[in-house]
Each structure stands twice: as C-alpha cells, then as structure tokens.
Image: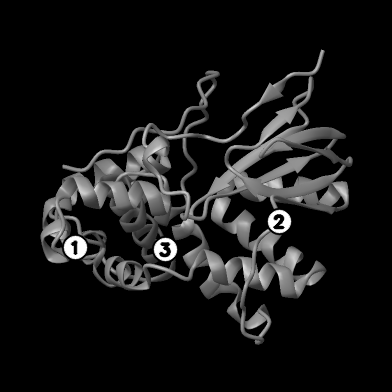
Amino acid sequence: MCHLRRPGNHSPHASNQSDDVMTVQLILFKQASEVRVKGELHTIQPNSLVLTDDKALIASDTENWKPFVFHVGDFQDLYLGVIDLLDDAPVSMFKPAALRQIQVDEALINVALLLAEASPAAMLHFIYAYCLGCDKTYFTALLKQCVAGDQGFFDFIEANFCKPWTVTQFADELGLPVRKLNFLFHEKFGMSAKHWLLERRLNLARKLLLTTEMRVIDIAFECGFSNHAHFTDSFKKRYQRSPTELRQGRQPEVNTSFDLAPPVLSVA
C-alpha cells in the first residue's frame, strides 16, 4: 500500500521559519509517483525532476526518488553563477506554482545524483541551468524572487566570513543578539552560524590548497582560523585528509563501515 512520506530534511528550527522565506525542495524521480502539496495530489511521471516546497508529501512504496532541500542562501550563490542565463525582463506579480514538474532523460538524473554526492550546490547549478533552458521566463522569476530580500545581510557575511571572528563577534557587528543571528542562518541557510562559517572557510581553504602555492599556515590565517592546529583538525574531519595530504593528492582511507553520516564539524 502506498503511503505519504515527507522527504525533506527538517531542522528543529523549521517551525520558527517565516512563511515568506523561500525554501525549495528539488526531488528527482526515476519512477512514477504522486506528490501531495497543500492538499492537492499531483501525478509524477517517470524520470522527472520536481520543484516544490519542503512540506510536500510523496505517495510511494519505492525508493526511486531523491529529495534535496535548498534555502535562500543556496539561491544567492546560484544567482551569481547563472546570472548571464537569466531573462532581462523585469519580474512583477510572480507567484510560483505549488509544484513544477519537468520530464528529463534518465541520464540527466544519474548525472545530477553523481554531482550531488560531491556537491549539492554543483548539482543545483546543473539542474537550474537545465530548467532555464526549458522555461527561461518562469525559472528566472523564481530565482529572482528567492534572492529578492536581505541582500545586505548576505553581502556582509560574504565580505567578512574570512575574518577571525567568533559568532558572537559577527552578531555584535550586525547589532543582533546571537540567538537572532542563529535564527537568520537557520532561516537562510538551514544551519547554524557556527556550522556555516566553518563550512565556508574550509571550502575556501580547499580551493586555495588546490589552486595556489600558499603555505598551509598562511591559508589557515587567510580563511579565518586562529591557529594552524585547529585548521588542520577541522579540515581533516571535513575532508578525511589533512591539508598537506590533499595538496599532495593522497586519497583518503576507504571507510568499509555502513555509517555514511557526514562528519561532525566543530569550531573552537
């Protein structure tokens, strides 16, 4: 018997989020299914990608679908990557569909799933570029609506994430209580400020290790880490190898267990 499942990953802060905040769920289907959104049941064709909200329920007795939840912060990065593909016409009175379905080749789904293993952000760029090719007007309007608000907040954290500030210092600079700052990060990025800052700093450090000749210790300081030991420990937890091992091309040890949970990140 088919039953309804909520596929999205919901944080404990989800109930506090504003209904005005854009949270988009992308679901890849290999087989036919049904999705209920806001009380309405939608039939999903085999080999489809679906964009809907994070409260959608899937009626299916198979596991041939894969969900991904993206927040406003994810779309800020996406916007910069696909801006040249967008429609130049101004957007007015746009109301996104409760569910938008696009049929695709199975090969595209397989490529998307492969990309998602390495980087959900890369997968989102790939899928969204494809969606723009299918309906440029609609998906331009959707993206512009996603990034319409809080630009000052995004600009500030992007300009300052490399400074060796604690979460408390970021909150002070923005004139916010720490609790409010964490609420904004959960709302915009789906994670705490502490988690986002560490992930963003480590991502930049990885890029610098692979594309520059900077010393490891200089990269650590450049990316906002207060000491070399903390940087090395955090990097190894995140990427399963040290900064030096990454630069030298050494592969991480194979994990033969069945525990596929992501590593726990921490900030000193």
Height in image: 163 above or below 202?
Answer: below
Question: Which amino acid type is marked by label 1?
Answer: Phe
Q: Label 1: which residue? A: 221
Return the x and y of residue 33 as percentages of the image width and height. 83, 32
Label 2 CA crowd tier, 10 Å (few <14, some 14–19, many 20+): few
Give the quarter of the image for residue 13. Answer: top left
Distance between the alpha carbons at the discs numbered 2 and 1: 45 Å
Distance between the alpha carbons at the discs numbered 1 and 3: 14 Å
Q: Residue at x 57, y 41 (%)?
A: 54
Is tag 2's residue or tag 3's residue first in the polypeptide sequence? Answer: 2
Residue 224 located left or right of residue 9: left
Height in image: 40 above or below 204?
Answer: above
Image mark for residue 97:
2
Q: Secondary structure at mark 3?
A: helix
Q: Residue at x 31, y 67 (%)?
A: 153
Return the x and y of residue 60 as percentages of the image width and height. 78, 24
* Residue lying farthest to the top in this orientation: 1
Question: Which amino acid type is marked by label 3?
Answer: Lys
Which mark lies nearer to you, 2 or 3?
A: 2
Which mark lies nearer to you, 2 or 1?
A: 2
Q: Secondary structure at mark 1?
A: helix
Give the quarter of the image for residue 140. Answer: bottom right
Do callouts 1 and 3 mark residues in contact (Cβ within 8 Å)? no
Return the x and y of residue 141 as percentages of the image width and height. 64, 71
Q: Secondary structure at mark 2?
A: loop
